[in-house]
Amino acid sequence: MDWGMENRLARIIKPGSHRTVMLAADHGYFLGPTRKLEDPGSTLRPLIPYADALMVTRGVVRSSLDPQMDIPIVLRVSGGVSIVGPALSDEGLANSVKDAVRINATAMALSIFVGTAHERQTLLNLAELVDQGTEHGIPVLAVTAVGKELEKRDARYLGLACRMAAEIGANFVKTYYCDDFSKVVESCPVPIVMAGGPKLETDMDAFELVHAAISEGASGVDMGRNIWQSEFPVAKIRAVRAIVHEGANPKEANQVFEEAKAGMKS
Ligand code: 5RP
C-alpha cells in the first residue's frame, strides 16, 4: 500500500488498538435537518475531542467546522437523492476528488445499494472512486446502504455486499450489525466498521450493540444518532470509546457513561 494511503488509514483506524470511533453526521445529504443535527457545528463541536474521525459532507465541513480542528474528515461524496424522492438507491458521485483533496479529506465515503435497480450504477461509482482515490492516496469507505428496506440487514445480504465492496477495491467498509455478524467480518478482507442505525431505546442497548460488533470482529463503529441524539452525547461517546478502544463490557461502559454524566452535572 502506498505511504499516503497507509498514513491516512492509520489516522482513522488507530494503530494502537487497530480500531476506530467514527462520528457519523452526514445524514443531511438525503434526510435534510435531522433531529439534533439542525445546527451541525454546535452539536459536533463538543464531541470532536472524543472521535477518531468525522463523517460529514463538504457543505457541513465548509459551513460549520473550524478548519483548524485536528480531526480526520471522512467525506461523504455520494448523493443526489432524497428521502422524499423516488429511489434512495439512485446515487451518483456528488463531489469531485479534486474538491476532497482541497478539503484535506482523510477518506471518502460512498454508498452502494446491492440488489436494487441501481446496483450496477452504485458499484461502478465505487469502482470509479477507488480508481481516483488510489491515484491520490485517499482511502475509500464503502457503505452497504439498505435505504428504507431495513429488513435486508441479515448476514447473507450484508456478507454479500461487504465482500463485493472489498473486491471492487474499497479500503474499508461500513455495514450494519446482524445475527452471525462474525461471518460477515470473516468473509470481508478489509476492515469493517459498524453503522449505528436509528436511536435505540436505552443507552445500554447501544452499549450492547457496540460490544457485540467489536467482540465479533468489527474494527470500530461509525455512529451518529445513538450518540448525538442522546441526552448526554459527550458521556455517550466516551462510553462507546471505552468499549472500542479499552475493551470495556456494556456494564463497564455504562459506568463510564454515568461517571461522565455526573462530572458534567457537578
Ligand atoms: C447513511 C450513513 C450514516 O452515516 C449512517 O447511517 C450512520 O449513522 P447512524 O449511526 O445514525 O445510523 O452512512 O447512509
Image (tube, rainbow, N blue to C red):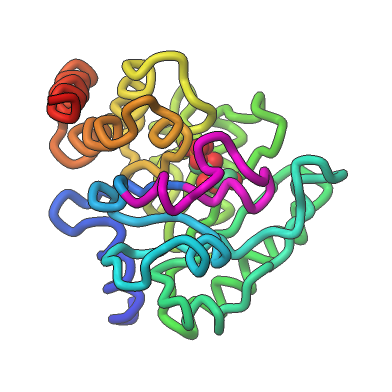
Where residue 156 sits in the image (x, y, percent)? 58, 32
**Is 239 left or right of 104, judged from the image as shown?**
left
Whether residue 141 is situated above or below residue 215 in the rendered picture = below
Q: Is residue 168 visible?
A: no
Is 36 contained in the magenta span? yes
Q: Which residue sits furthest right?
A: 86
Q: What span is colored magenta in the figure?
A: 25-45
Q: 92 above or below 4?
A: above
User: Is residue 239 in the magenta section?
Assistant: no
User: Considering the image in quadrants, where does the N terminus appear?
Assistant: bottom left
> Viewer-proximal residue, 139 or 265?
265
Q: Position of residue 69 (x, y in %)?
A: 29, 66
Residue at (68% x, 68% y) in the render: 93
> In the picture provided, is 94 more to the left or to the right than 231?
right
Question: Residue at left 31%, top 59%?
Answer: 12
Residue 25 drawn above or below residue 180: below
Quadrant assignment, res 83:
top right
Determine which quarter of the picture holds residue 221: top left
* Total numbered labels: 0
